[in-house]
Amino acid sequence: MKLDPTISAIDLGTTKFCCANLFRSDTSSIRIAEVAASGMSKGMLVDFDKAKTALNELIKKSEDSYNHDLQKVVVGVAGSHLSGQKIETAIDLADGIVTLDEINRLSEKAEEKATQNTREILHCHPISFSLDDRDPVENPLHLSGRTLTGTFFIIDADRAYLKDLVRLFNLCGLEITQFYSEPFASASVTTTEEQKNLGIAIADIGGGTTDGIVYQNGHPVDIFTINIAGSLMTRDLSIGLQINQNSARMLKEEIGLGHSQKKGTVTTIYGKEKSIESYQVNQILAPRVLELGAYIASALKQYRGSLSGGIFFTGGGSNLSGIVDFLKSHFKIHVDQLLPHYGSGDEDAVFSSRHATVIGLINLELERLRELDSHADPSWKDRFITPIYNWIKELS
């Protein structure tokens, strides 16, 4: 009997393509299939035909592994073309009282203000509201005033690039129903509201890029992309030690930046066995991780002193042995690795950090569908996901 997927999500990473499925018959668990990536660089599509071959392989593996038909998917978007900005706008209140319609009208005005012909808005998240000259509030519903002002954080993406993704998935027989920014997705399943309220930065170290998002007072306020990640570290080891990529990846994960006397035996590119000491791996990886740390510090310099919750790492690159302790000594604030989780309370299922993005995509889509199923008007808090379904349908 074929299973009926409730939600399917795909993450096209630089080093791996992942498909996660949440099934109606078992909504307590998420099942994941993955294949080696192709046609991607720095988190973005660069070779259409190679990516098509890899995506078709992923679709077949997912369908064969879990006996289901893959038809509609949500897709993560990453890369340096993503941008975030704060938009402030205001409206006059017709009846002097804030209603849900007025809040939605204000949100739509913020999106109109941010709209560009070459960009597509993915998320529009309310940060704060104020009435007339009063102090900001988080929920202005039912309050009185003359003018309602709102500040929103908007994440958008290159429209032409999204069109390429739509064509790619259509040619593989899939319909994209929603795009989500990957930093936002990862954060949704790795951090708590308490942490976000304290002020935190989450850096998802993937294969090609490190994608980050900053939260203050519980709201996203900034995103950043750094073109240093796991595949570059693997390449450093491969070149420095004259070994193949698989051996370099093994050394990175098993020895990494740890200070143990652990050794590894690998085969060089010349076919000879070679014993590698931990200090040799450390000497190669440390400068690259320091460089990554410096770029992260630069991206976060305006938030110095306001990230009380610290800096958290997730993504496959955060599995580099010793990276958390190494960076902790340089950032001088709380640094930790976060694992993605799905579920509720004590029954949460915990996944590998390498799957943070694809689990986050499932989570965001599940929240969106729950809102639609409630048959209620979307609340102002739930408008951070911009519906672009009709636009996607036009491209299909």
Image (cartoon, helix red, strand yellow):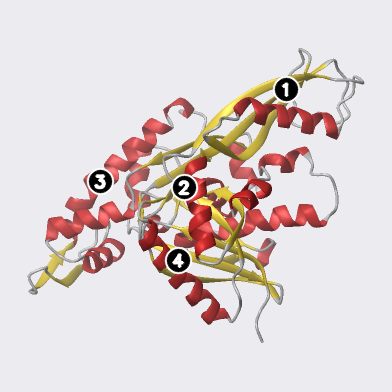
Q: Image check: 237 left or right of 274?
A: right
Which residue bears the numbered disc 2?
78
Mark nearer the N terminus (1 vs 2): 2
Q: Where 344 falls versus 182 (above or below)?
A: below
> Between 34 and 69, which is closer to the camera in this rendering?
69
| Dot 2 amino acid type | Ala
Q: Camera-side residue: 205 or 387?
A: 387
Which is in the foreground here, disc 1 or disc 4? 4
Compare marks 3 and 4 and give the one earlier in the sequence. 4
Residue beneath label 1, please? Answer: 136
Residue 274: percent from left, percent from top? 10, 70
Residue found 44% across the figure and 39% down from its top:
81
Label ID, residue 98: none
Is residue 2 visible in the rendered image? The answer is yes
Of callouts 1 and 4, which one flags the residue occurring earlier in the amino acid sequence?
4
Determine contact: label 1, label 2, CB under 8 Å.
Answer: no
Q: Which residue is mark 4?
A: 55
Secondary structure at numbered mark 2: loop
Find numbered disc 1 in the image and state the secondary structure of the residue it sits on: loop
Residue 204, percent from left and from top = 45, 49
Q: Are marks 1 and 4 in contact (CB under 8 Å)?
A: no
Quadrant for the C terminus, please.
bottom right
Tell me where residue 372 appears, x and y as whole percent: 78, 53
- Label for residue 288? 3
Q: Name the residue at 89% across, 23% down.
A: 97
As drawn, is 26 to the left or to the right of 202?
A: right
Amino acid marked by disc 4? Leu
Give residue 141's position: percent from left, percent from top: 84, 31
Mark 3 and mark 4: span between their CA atoms?
A: 31 Å
